[in-house]
Protein backbone atom coordinates (compact mmCIF):
# COMPACT_ATOMS: atom_id res chain seq x y z
CA UNK A 1 0.00 0.00 0.00
CA UNK A 2 2.81 2.41 0.83
CA UNK A 3 4.43 1.57 -2.49
CA UNK A 4 1.14 1.99 -4.29
CA UNK A 5 -0.03 5.26 -2.81
CA UNK A 6 2.58 7.09 -0.79
CA UNK A 7 4.13 8.96 -3.70
CA UNK A 8 0.81 10.79 -3.87
CA UNK A 9 -0.35 10.71 -0.25
CA UNK A 10 3.02 11.59 1.36
CA UNK A 11 2.04 10.07 4.69
CA UNK A 12 5.56 8.90 5.58
CA UNK A 13 8.72 10.92 6.03
CA UNK A 14 10.80 7.80 6.63
CA UNK A 15 10.04 4.14 6.11
CA UNK A 16 11.73 1.32 8.02
CA UNK A 17 14.09 -0.87 6.06
CA UNK A 18 12.12 -3.40 4.07
CA UNK A 19 14.35 -6.38 4.94
CA UNK A 20 14.16 -5.58 8.60
CA UNK A 21 10.36 -5.34 8.52
CA UNK A 22 10.17 -8.65 6.66
CA UNK A 23 12.44 -10.33 9.19
CA UNK A 24 10.43 -9.00 12.13
CA UNK A 25 7.21 -10.17 10.48
CA UNK A 26 8.65 -13.65 9.98
CA UNK A 27 9.73 -13.81 13.61
CA UNK A 28 6.26 -12.72 14.73
CA UNK A 29 4.66 -15.31 12.48
CA UNK A 30 6.80 -18.02 14.01
CA UNK A 31 6.03 -16.92 17.55
CA UNK A 32 2.32 -16.85 16.84
CA UNK A 33 2.38 -20.30 15.18
CA UNK A 34 4.28 -21.68 18.18
CA UNK A 35 1.69 -20.20 20.54
CA UNK A 36 4.32 -17.83 21.96
CA UNK A 37 2.77 -14.49 21.18
CA UNK A 38 5.06 -11.71 22.42
CA UNK A 39 2.14 -9.46 23.29
CA UNK A 40 -1.25 -8.30 22.04
CA UNK A 41 0.29 -6.48 19.06
CA UNK A 42 2.62 -9.21 17.84
CA UNK A 43 3.31 -8.73 14.14
CA UNK A 44 1.03 -5.71 13.84
CA UNK A 45 2.34 -2.85 11.69
CA UNK A 46 2.18 0.55 13.37
CA UNK A 47 3.33 3.97 12.15
CA UNK A 48 4.71 6.67 14.43
CA UNK A 49 4.30 10.42 14.13
CA UNK A 50 7.69 11.99 13.60
CA UNK A 51 7.73 13.83 16.93
CA UNK A 52 8.17 10.61 18.95
CA UNK A 53 11.79 9.68 19.51
CA UNK A 54 12.92 6.46 17.84
CA UNK A 55 16.43 5.09 18.09
CA UNK A 56 16.43 3.41 14.67
CA UNK A 57 14.72 6.11 12.62
CA UNK A 58 15.26 9.87 12.57
CA UNK A 59 13.01 12.16 14.60
CA UNK A 60 12.57 15.38 12.66
CA UNK A 61 9.25 16.87 13.85
CA UNK A 62 8.96 17.69 10.12
CA UNK A 63 11.35 20.58 10.71
CA UNK A 64 14.52 21.58 8.86
CA UNK A 65 15.88 22.29 12.35
CA UNK A 66 15.86 18.57 13.22
CA UNK A 67 16.22 17.10 9.73
CA UNK A 68 19.22 14.99 10.74
CA UNK A 69 18.33 14.33 14.37
CA UNK A 70 18.85 10.77 15.49
CA UNK A 71 17.57 10.06 18.98
CA UNK A 72 19.66 7.75 21.15
CA UNK A 73 16.50 6.28 22.72
CA UNK A 74 12.90 5.29 22.04
CA UNK A 75 9.98 7.21 23.53
CA UNK A 76 8.30 5.16 26.26
CA UNK A 77 5.20 4.59 24.10
CA UNK A 78 7.34 3.39 21.18
CA UNK A 79 9.17 1.02 23.53
CA UNK A 80 5.82 -0.31 24.82
CA UNK A 81 4.66 -0.98 21.25
CA UNK A 82 7.87 -2.82 20.38
CA UNK A 83 7.71 -4.86 23.59
CA UNK A 84 4.19 -5.96 22.77
CA UNK A 85 5.38 -7.23 19.38
CA UNK A 86 4.35 -4.36 17.12
CA UNK A 87 6.39 -3.70 13.98
CA UNK A 88 7.30 -0.04 13.55
CA UNK A 89 6.71 0.71 9.88
CA UNK A 90 8.07 4.23 9.76
CA UNK A 91 7.65 7.85 10.77
CA UNK A 92 4.75 9.94 9.58
CA UNK A 93 4.45 13.47 8.26
CA UNK A 94 3.07 16.29 10.40
CA UNK A 95 2.87 20.04 10.76
CA UNK A 96 6.26 21.26 11.99
CA UNK A 97 6.54 20.61 15.75
CA UNK A 98 2.77 19.87 15.80
CA UNK A 99 1.79 23.44 14.99
CA UNK A 100 -1.08 23.38 12.56
CA UNK A 101 -4.32 21.68 11.61
CA UNK A 102 -3.55 20.82 8.02
CA UNK A 103 -0.19 19.04 7.54
CA UNK A 104 0.80 21.70 5.06
CA UNK A 105 3.51 23.21 7.29
CA UNK A 106 6.05 20.43 6.88
CA UNK A 107 9.66 20.46 5.72
CA UNK A 108 8.75 17.31 3.75
CA UNK A 109 5.78 18.71 1.85
CA UNK A 110 2.02 18.37 2.34
CA UNK A 111 0.14 15.19 3.11
CA UNK A 112 -2.88 14.51 0.88
CA UNK A 113 -6.14 13.05 2.09
CA UNK A 114 -6.42 9.50 0.70
CA UNK A 115 -10.17 9.12 1.24
CA UNK A 116 -10.92 9.33 -2.50
CA UNK A 117 -7.90 7.95 -4.28
CA UNK A 118 -9.12 9.46 -7.57
CA UNK A 119 -8.81 12.97 -6.05
CA UNK A 120 -5.15 12.57 -5.13
CA UNK A 121 -3.79 13.95 -8.38
CA UNK A 122 -6.27 16.68 -9.04
CA UNK A 123 -8.26 18.55 -6.41
CA UNK A 124 -6.62 16.78 -3.47
CA UNK A 125 -7.89 17.63 0.01
CA UNK A 126 -5.86 18.17 3.15
CA UNK A 127 -5.52 15.27 5.55
CA UNK A 128 -5.84 17.60 8.54
CA UNK A 129 -3.20 18.05 11.16
CA UNK A 130 -0.98 18.05 12.80
CA UNK A 131 -1.00 14.21 12.78
CA UNK A 132 -2.00 14.21 9.08
CA UNK A 133 0.52 11.57 8.03
CA UNK A 134 -0.66 9.22 10.77
CA UNK A 135 -4.34 9.66 9.83
CA UNK A 136 -3.62 9.25 6.12
CA UNK A 137 -1.50 6.13 6.66
CA UNK A 138 -4.31 4.45 8.60
CA UNK A 139 -7.05 5.62 6.21
CA UNK A 140 -5.22 4.22 3.18
CA UNK A 141 -4.56 0.88 4.85
CA UNK A 142 -0.79 1.35 5.02
CA UNK A 143 -0.77 0.28 8.67
CA UNK A 144 -3.07 -1.07 11.34
CA UNK A 145 -2.80 1.98 13.60
CA UNK A 146 -0.59 5.01 14.09
CA UNK A 147 0.61 7.10 16.99
CA UNK A 148 -0.24 10.77 16.89
CA UNK A 149 0.05 13.59 19.37
CA UNK A 150 -2.88 15.78 20.34
CA UNK A 151 -2.18 19.18 21.89
CA UNK A 152 -5.33 20.94 20.72
CA UNK A 153 -6.98 18.41 18.42
CA UNK A 154 -4.19 17.07 16.23
CA UNK A 155 -5.38 13.48 16.41
CA UNK A 156 -9.13 14.08 16.35
CA UNK A 157 -9.24 16.60 13.51
CA UNK A 158 -7.24 14.61 10.92
CA UNK A 159 -9.16 11.48 11.98
CA UNK A 160 -12.41 13.24 11.12
CA UNK A 161 -11.13 14.53 7.77
CA UNK A 162 -9.75 11.12 6.76
CA UNK A 163 -12.62 8.95 8.06
CA UNK A 164 -10.81 7.08 10.83
CA UNK A 165 -10.99 6.90 14.64
CA UNK A 166 -8.81 9.37 16.59
CA UNK A 167 -8.51 8.86 20.34
CA UNK A 168 -6.97 11.31 22.81
CA UNK A 169 -6.83 9.75 26.29
CA UNK A 170 -6.76 11.86 29.47
CA UNK A 171 -3.68 14.07 29.91
CA UNK A 172 -1.12 12.10 31.90
CA UNK A 173 -2.52 8.67 30.96
CA UNK A 174 0.13 7.75 28.36
CA UNK A 175 3.74 8.71 28.85
CA UNK A 176 5.08 11.81 27.09
CA UNK A 177 8.66 10.75 27.70
CA UNK A 178 10.37 10.98 24.30
CA UNK A 179 7.56 12.97 22.71
CA UNK A 180 9.18 16.21 21.54
CA UNK A 181 7.44 19.02 23.42
CA UNK A 182 5.18 21.53 21.73
CA UNK A 183 3.12 22.74 24.73
CA UNK A 184 3.87 20.45 27.67
CA UNK A 185 0.76 21.14 29.70
CA UNK A 186 -1.45 20.12 26.76
CA UNK A 187 0.57 17.52 24.80
CA UNK A 188 -1.13 14.12 24.87
CA UNK A 189 -0.26 10.86 23.14
CA UNK A 190 -3.07 9.87 20.76
CA UNK A 191 -4.02 6.85 18.67
CA UNK A 192 -5.37 6.64 15.13
CA UNK A 193 -7.01 3.40 14.03
CA UNK A 194 -9.80 2.19 11.79
CA UNK A 195 -12.16 1.08 14.56
CA UNK A 196 -12.73 1.86 18.24
CA UNK A 197 -11.77 -1.73 19.08
CA UNK A 198 -8.43 -1.35 17.27
CA UNK A 199 -7.77 1.92 19.12
CA UNK A 200 -8.61 0.23 22.42
CA UNK A 201 -6.14 -2.57 21.71
CA UNK A 202 -3.31 -0.07 21.25
CA UNK A 203 -4.51 2.08 24.16
CA UNK A 204 -4.38 -0.92 26.52
CA UNK A 205 -0.71 -1.36 25.66
CA UNK A 206 0.17 2.33 26.12
CA UNK A 207 -1.84 3.36 29.19
CA UNK A 208 0.81 2.63 31.78
CA UNK A 209 2.28 4.87 34.48
CA UNK A 210 5.81 5.99 33.64
CA UNK A 211 8.09 7.44 36.27
CA UNK A 212 10.21 9.05 33.56
CA UNK A 213 7.35 11.43 32.75
CA UNK A 214 6.76 13.79 35.67
CA UNK A 215 3.16 14.37 34.54
CA UNK A 216 2.31 10.68 34.22
CA UNK A 217 -0.61 9.90 36.52
CA UNK A 218 -0.51 6.77 38.71
CA UNK A 219 -2.90 4.06 37.52
CA UNK A 220 -4.86 4.02 40.82
CA UNK A 221 -6.35 7.38 39.88
CA UNK A 222 -7.88 5.80 36.83
CA UNK A 223 -9.31 2.81 38.66
CA UNK A 224 -10.90 4.89 41.38
CA UNK A 225 -14.62 5.31 40.87
CA UNK A 226 -14.35 4.05 37.30
CA UNK A 227 -17.44 1.89 37.63
CA UNK A 228 -19.90 4.17 39.30
CA UNK A 229 -22.55 2.93 36.88
CA UNK A 230 -22.22 -0.54 35.35
CA UNK A 231 -21.57 -0.62 31.62
CA UNK A 232 -24.09 -2.78 29.72
CA UNK A 233 -22.39 -4.78 27.04
CA UNK A 234 -24.38 -3.88 23.97
CA UNK A 235 -26.66 -1.00 24.76
CA UNK A 236 -26.62 2.39 26.43
CA UNK A 237 -29.11 1.84 29.24
CA UNK A 238 -27.93 3.96 32.18
CA UNK A 239 -25.84 6.19 29.96
CA UNK A 240 -26.60 9.88 29.98
CA UNK A 241 -25.41 11.80 26.95
CA UNK A 242 -25.04 15.57 27.13
CA UNK A 243 -25.43 17.91 24.19
CA UNK A 244 -23.79 21.32 24.73
CA UNK A 245 -26.46 23.90 24.05
CA UNK A 246 -24.13 26.69 23.15
CA UNK A 247 -22.75 24.63 20.32
CA UNK A 248 -19.23 25.78 21.19
CA UNK A 249 -20.24 29.04 19.54
CA UNK A 250 -17.73 30.96 17.54
CA UNK A 251 -19.59 34.19 17.97
CA UNK A 252 -17.59 35.18 21.03
CA UNK A 253 -14.94 36.60 18.75
CA UNK A 254 -17.37 39.17 17.52
CA UNK A 255 -18.28 40.22 21.03
CA UNK A 256 -14.83 40.36 22.51
CA UNK A 257 -12.83 42.00 19.78
CA UNK A 258 -12.99 45.31 18.07
CA UNK A 259 -12.09 43.71 14.77
CA UNK A 260 -15.00 42.41 12.71
CA UNK A 261 -14.17 38.77 13.32
CA UNK A 262 -17.29 37.67 11.53
CA UNK A 263 -15.71 38.53 8.25
CA UNK A 264 -12.77 36.24 8.99
CA UNK A 265 -14.63 33.29 10.40
CA UNK A 266 -17.17 30.80 9.37
CA UNK A 267 -19.81 31.70 11.91
CA UNK A 268 -21.81 28.52 11.46
CA UNK A 269 -21.20 24.89 11.41
CA UNK A 270 -21.72 23.29 8.03
CA UNK A 271 -25.37 22.16 7.89
CA UNK A 272 -24.46 18.65 6.81
CA UNK A 273 -22.47 18.28 10.03
CA UNK A 274 -25.39 19.53 12.12
CA UNK A 275 -27.66 16.97 10.39
CA UNK A 276 -25.30 14.10 11.16
CA UNK A 277 -24.86 15.33 14.72
CA UNK A 278 -28.64 15.22 15.22
CA UNK A 279 -28.80 11.80 13.62
CA UNK A 280 -26.19 10.50 16.07
CA UNK A 281 -28.07 11.95 19.05
CA UNK A 282 -31.22 10.24 17.85
CA UNK A 283 -29.37 6.96 17.34
CA UNK A 284 -27.86 7.01 20.84
CA UNK A 285 -31.31 7.72 22.23
CA UNK A 286 -32.77 4.72 20.39
CA UNK A 287 -30.00 2.55 21.82
CA UNK A 288 -31.19 3.42 25.33
CA UNK A 289 -29.22 6.57 26.23
CA UNK A 290 -30.89 9.52 27.92
CA UNK A 291 -30.17 12.76 26.09
CA UNK A 292 -29.69 15.88 28.20
CA UNK A 293 -28.96 19.43 27.06
CA UNK A 294 -26.07 20.88 29.06
CA UNK A 295 -24.43 24.23 29.31
CA UNK A 296 -20.67 24.86 29.29
CA UNK A 297 -20.65 28.65 29.35
CA UNK A 298 -16.88 29.16 29.34
CA UNK A 299 -16.22 26.84 26.43
CA UNK A 300 -16.72 29.69 24.03
CA UNK A 301 -13.51 31.29 25.29
CA UNK A 302 -11.45 28.14 24.80
CA UNK A 303 -10.06 28.92 21.36
CA UNK A 304 -8.52 32.32 22.15
CA UNK A 305 -7.23 31.01 25.50
CA UNK A 306 -5.54 28.08 23.77
CA UNK A 307 -3.88 30.32 21.19
CA UNK A 308 -2.32 32.29 24.03
CA UNK A 309 -1.24 29.34 26.18
CA UNK A 310 0.05 26.94 23.51
CA UNK A 311 2.33 29.45 21.73
CA UNK A 312 3.59 30.72 25.11
CA UNK A 313 4.72 27.22 26.07
CA UNK A 314 6.03 26.62 22.55
CA UNK A 315 8.15 29.77 22.55
CA UNK A 316 9.81 28.60 25.72
CA UNK A 317 10.26 24.98 24.54
CA UNK A 318 11.69 25.94 21.18
CA UNK A 319 14.32 28.25 22.69
CA UNK A 320 16.62 25.23 22.95
CA UNK A 321 17.04 24.98 19.16
CA UNK A 322 19.90 27.38 18.70
CA UNK A 323 22.28 25.31 16.62
CA UNK A 324 24.66 25.01 19.55
CA UNK A 325 22.92 22.86 22.10
CA UNK A 326 20.32 21.39 19.72
CA UNK A 327 19.35 21.48 16.10
CA UNK A 328 21.04 21.80 12.72
CA UNK A 329 23.56 24.61 12.69
CA UNK A 330 23.62 27.15 9.86
CA UNK A 331 26.91 26.57 7.96
CA UNK A 332 27.18 29.97 6.30
CA UNK A 333 28.12 31.84 9.45
CA UNK A 334 31.61 31.89 10.90
CA UNK A 335 30.87 34.08 13.94
CA UNK A 336 30.01 32.24 17.13
CA UNK A 337 27.95 35.02 18.71
CA UNK A 338 24.21 35.62 18.32
CA UNK A 339 24.63 35.97 14.54
CA UNK A 340 24.90 32.17 14.44
CA UNK A 341 21.90 31.79 16.68
CA UNK A 342 19.75 34.12 14.55
CA UNK A 343 20.83 32.59 11.24
CA UNK A 344 20.24 29.06 12.52
CA UNK A 345 16.74 29.79 13.77
CA UNK A 346 15.85 31.77 10.68
CA UNK A 347 16.90 28.93 8.43
CA UNK A 348 15.68 26.07 10.63
CA UNK A 349 12.11 27.11 11.46
CA UNK A 350 9.19 27.46 9.08
CA UNK A 351 6.83 30.40 8.90
CA UNK A 352 4.12 29.02 11.19
CA UNK A 353 6.60 28.05 13.91
CA UNK A 354 8.17 31.51 13.78
CA UNK A 355 4.72 33.06 14.09
CA UNK A 356 4.00 31.01 17.23
CA UNK A 357 7.37 31.87 18.78
CA UNK A 358 6.75 35.57 18.27
CA UNK A 359 3.19 35.32 19.57
CA UNK A 360 4.23 33.31 22.62
CA UNK A 361 7.19 35.52 23.44
CA UNK A 362 4.91 38.52 23.23
CA UNK A 363 2.25 37.15 25.59
CA UNK A 364 4.95 36.27 28.12
CA UNK A 365 6.47 39.75 28.17
CA UNK A 366 5.91 41.89 31.22
CA UNK A 367 3.45 44.21 29.50
CA UNK A 368 1.06 41.52 28.29
CA UNK A 369 1.53 38.74 30.82
CA UNK A 370 -1.28 39.91 33.10
CA UNK A 371 -3.69 40.81 30.32
CA UNK A 372 -3.11 37.79 28.14
CA UNK A 373 -1.34 34.88 29.73
CA UNK A 374 -2.89 35.05 33.16
CA UNK A 375 -6.38 35.66 31.78
CA UNK A 376 -6.01 32.64 29.53
CA UNK A 377 -4.95 30.50 32.50
CA UNK A 378 -8.09 31.62 34.33
CA UNK A 379 -10.25 30.75 31.35
CA UNK A 380 -8.61 27.34 31.29
CA UNK A 381 -9.58 26.82 34.93
CA UNK A 382 -13.18 27.91 34.21
CA UNK A 383 -13.42 25.43 31.35
CA UNK A 384 -12.29 22.63 33.65
CA UNK A 385 -14.89 23.71 36.20
CA UNK A 386 -17.60 23.72 33.52
CA UNK A 387 -16.80 20.14 32.60
CA UNK A 388 -16.70 19.06 36.25
CA UNK A 389 -20.15 20.57 36.66
CA UNK A 390 -21.70 18.57 33.83
CA UNK A 391 -20.20 15.12 34.36
CA UNK A 392 -21.84 12.76 36.85
CA UNK A 393 -18.49 11.26 37.72
CA UNK A 394 -16.27 13.35 39.97
CA UNK A 395 -12.91 14.45 38.67
CA UNK A 396 -10.37 12.19 40.41
CA UNK A 397 -7.71 14.90 40.12
CA UNK A 398 -9.68 17.20 42.40
CA UNK A 399 -8.55 15.12 45.36
CA UNK A 400 -10.19 12.45 47.47
CA UNK A 401 -12.31 14.83 49.53
CA UNK A 402 -13.97 15.95 46.29
CA UNK A 403 -14.97 12.54 44.99
CA UNK A 404 -18.44 12.75 46.53
CA UNK A 405 -19.00 15.99 44.75
CA UNK A 406 -20.62 14.52 41.69
CA UNK A 407 -23.15 16.33 39.58
CA UNK A 408 -26.19 14.11 40.30
CA UNK A 409 -28.10 15.38 37.28
CA UNK A 410 -24.97 15.21 35.20
CA UNK A 411 -24.01 13.20 32.16
CA UNK A 412 -21.50 10.46 31.34
CA UNK A 413 -20.39 11.68 27.95
CA UNK A 414 -20.84 14.73 25.75
CA UNK A 415 -21.35 14.58 22.01
CA UNK A 416 -20.21 17.35 19.68
CA UNK A 417 -18.93 17.71 16.12
CA UNK A 418 -15.15 17.51 15.60
CA UNK A 419 -14.75 19.96 12.76
CA UNK A 420 -16.77 22.78 11.28
CA UNK A 421 -16.54 21.39 7.74
CA UNK A 422 -15.21 18.42 5.82
CA UNK A 423 -11.57 18.47 4.64
CA UNK A 424 -10.95 21.55 2.48
CA UNK A 425 -9.11 21.33 -0.83
CA UNK A 426 -5.36 21.91 -0.54
CA UNK A 427 -5.63 24.82 -2.96
CA UNK A 428 -8.18 26.49 -0.66
CA UNK A 429 -5.83 26.51 2.31
CA UNK A 430 -2.57 27.23 0.52
CA UNK A 431 -3.88 30.16 -1.43
CA UNK A 432 -2.70 32.65 1.14
CA UNK A 433 -4.29 35.62 -0.57
CA UNK A 434 -7.31 36.64 1.44
CA UNK A 435 -6.60 34.06 4.14
CA UNK A 436 -4.74 34.77 7.34
CA UNK A 437 -3.23 32.49 9.93
CA UNK A 438 -6.02 33.08 12.42
CA UNK A 439 -8.53 31.69 9.96
CA UNK A 440 -6.81 28.33 10.18
CA UNK A 441 -6.93 28.41 13.99
CA UNK A 442 -10.73 28.51 14.03
CA UNK A 443 -10.86 24.92 12.77
CA UNK A 444 -9.80 23.78 16.23
CA UNK A 445 -12.81 25.28 17.99
CA UNK A 446 -14.46 21.92 18.74
CA UNK A 447 -11.40 20.03 19.85
CA UNK A 448 -9.61 22.54 22.07
CA UNK A 449 -11.96 22.50 25.11
CA UNK A 450 -11.10 18.86 25.92
CA UNK A 451 -7.40 19.66 25.55
CA UNK A 452 -7.54 22.57 27.98
CA UNK A 453 -9.40 20.41 30.50
CA UNK A 454 -7.16 17.36 29.94
CA UNK A 455 -10.20 15.09 29.55
CA UNK A 456 -10.44 12.10 27.18
CA UNK A 457 -12.05 12.62 23.77
CA UNK A 458 -12.52 10.51 20.67
CA UNK A 459 -13.42 11.28 17.08
CA UNK A 460 -15.50 8.60 15.35
CA UNK A 461 -16.38 8.54 11.63
CA UNK A 462 -20.10 9.10 11.37
CA UNK A 463 -21.21 9.44 7.79
CA UNK A 464 -20.36 11.22 4.61
CA UNK A 465 -21.24 14.74 3.58
CA UNK A 466 -23.66 14.62 0.65
CA UNK A 467 -22.08 17.87 -0.56
CA UNK A 468 -18.62 16.55 -1.36
CA UNK A 469 -18.54 12.86 -0.44
CA UNK A 470 -15.92 13.38 2.30
CA UNK A 471 -16.23 11.91 5.81
CA UNK A 472 -17.57 13.63 8.91
CA UNK A 473 -16.50 12.66 12.41
CA UNK A 474 -18.32 13.18 15.68
CA UNK A 475 -16.64 13.71 19.01
CA UNK A 476 -17.39 12.12 22.38
CA UNK A 477 -15.90 13.57 25.57
CA UNK A 478 -15.89 12.12 29.09
CA UNK A 479 -14.72 13.00 32.59
CA UNK A 480 -11.01 12.74 33.38
CA UNK A 481 -10.07 9.06 33.67
CA UNK A 482 -13.36 7.74 32.29
CA UNK A 483 -11.80 6.19 29.16
CA UNK A 484 -13.61 2.86 29.42
CA UNK A 485 -17.05 4.42 29.40
CA UNK A 486 -16.03 6.74 26.57
CA UNK A 487 -14.79 3.82 24.45
CA UNK A 488 -17.94 1.86 25.23
CA UNK A 489 -20.25 4.61 23.95
CA UNK A 490 -17.92 5.19 20.99
CA UNK A 491 -18.07 1.52 20.00
CA UNK A 492 -21.86 1.67 19.88
CA UNK A 493 -21.87 4.89 17.89
CA UNK A 494 -19.41 3.77 15.21
N1 LIG B 1 -4.07 23.04 15.50
C1 LIG B 1 -3.63 23.22 16.84
C2 LIG B 1 -2.35 24.01 16.85
O1 LIG B 1 -1.90 24.35 15.82
C3 LIG B 1 -3.46 21.91 17.53
C4 LIG B 1 -2.23 21.20 17.14
C5 LIG B 1 -1.96 19.94 17.93
O2 LIG B 1 -2.87 19.39 18.57
N2 LIG B 1 -0.70 19.54 17.92
O3 LIG B 1 -1.79 24.31 17.85
Image (cartoon, helix red, strand yellow):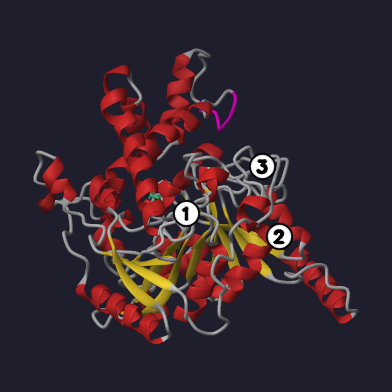
Residue 243 picture quarter: bottom left
* Residue under the image location 32 percent in, 82 percent down: 282
Under circle 1, the secondary element is loop
Q: Is residue 384 left or right of residue 438?
A: right
Secondary structure mainly formed by the magenta segment:
loop
Q: In the picture, residue 83 is in which quadrant?
A: bottom right
Which residue is disc 1 drawn over? 455
Pair 1/2: label in front: 1
- Residue 224: image location, x then y, percent: 62, 56
- How busy is the neighbourhood of tag 1: few (under 14 within 10 Å), some, or many (20 plus)? many
Sequence-earlier tag: 3 or 2: 3
Q: Position of residue 482 (x, y in %)?
A: 53, 61
Is residue 330 within the magenta segment?
Answer: yes
Disc on the earlier residue, 3 or 1:
3
Gap between marks 1 and 2 measured at Cα: 23 Å
The crowd level at tag 3 (other Cα within 10 Å; few <14, some 14-19, many 20+) is some
Q: Is residue 274 above or below residue 244?
A: below
Nearest to viewer (mark 3 / mark 1): 1
Residue at x 72% of width, y 69% of height: 41
* Relative depth, front residue between 393 and 384: 393
Q: Which contiguous range is marked in magenta?
A: 325-331
- Which residue is rendered at x = 56% and y = 75% of the image? 231
Corner quadrant of residue 359: top left
Mark 3 highlights which residue?
70
Q: Is residue 384 magenta?
A: no
**Residue at coordinates 17% horizontally, 47% vertically from top-left?**
253
Q: Is residue 193 in view?
A: no
Query: Which dot marks residue 81?
Result: 2
Helix or strand or loop: what does disc 2 sit on? helix
Distance CA(mark 3)–CA(mark 2):
19 Å
Residue 369 appears in the picture as rendered: yes
For marks 1 and 2, the one nearer the N-term is 2
Amino acid sequence: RIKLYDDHVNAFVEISEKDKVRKLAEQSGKRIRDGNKKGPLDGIPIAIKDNFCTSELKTTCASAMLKDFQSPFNATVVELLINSGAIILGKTNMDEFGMGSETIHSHFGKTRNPYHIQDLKDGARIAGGSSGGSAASVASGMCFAALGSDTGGSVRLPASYCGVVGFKPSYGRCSRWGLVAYANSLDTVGILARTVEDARLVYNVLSIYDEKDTTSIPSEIFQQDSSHIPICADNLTNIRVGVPETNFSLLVFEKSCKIDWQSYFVSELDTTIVTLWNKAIDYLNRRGATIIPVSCPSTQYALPAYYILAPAEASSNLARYDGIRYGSRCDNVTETDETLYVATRDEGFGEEVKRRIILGTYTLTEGSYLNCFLQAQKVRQLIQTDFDAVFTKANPLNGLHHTDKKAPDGVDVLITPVTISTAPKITEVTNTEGRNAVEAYVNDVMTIPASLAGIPAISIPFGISPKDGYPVGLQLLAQYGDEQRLLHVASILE
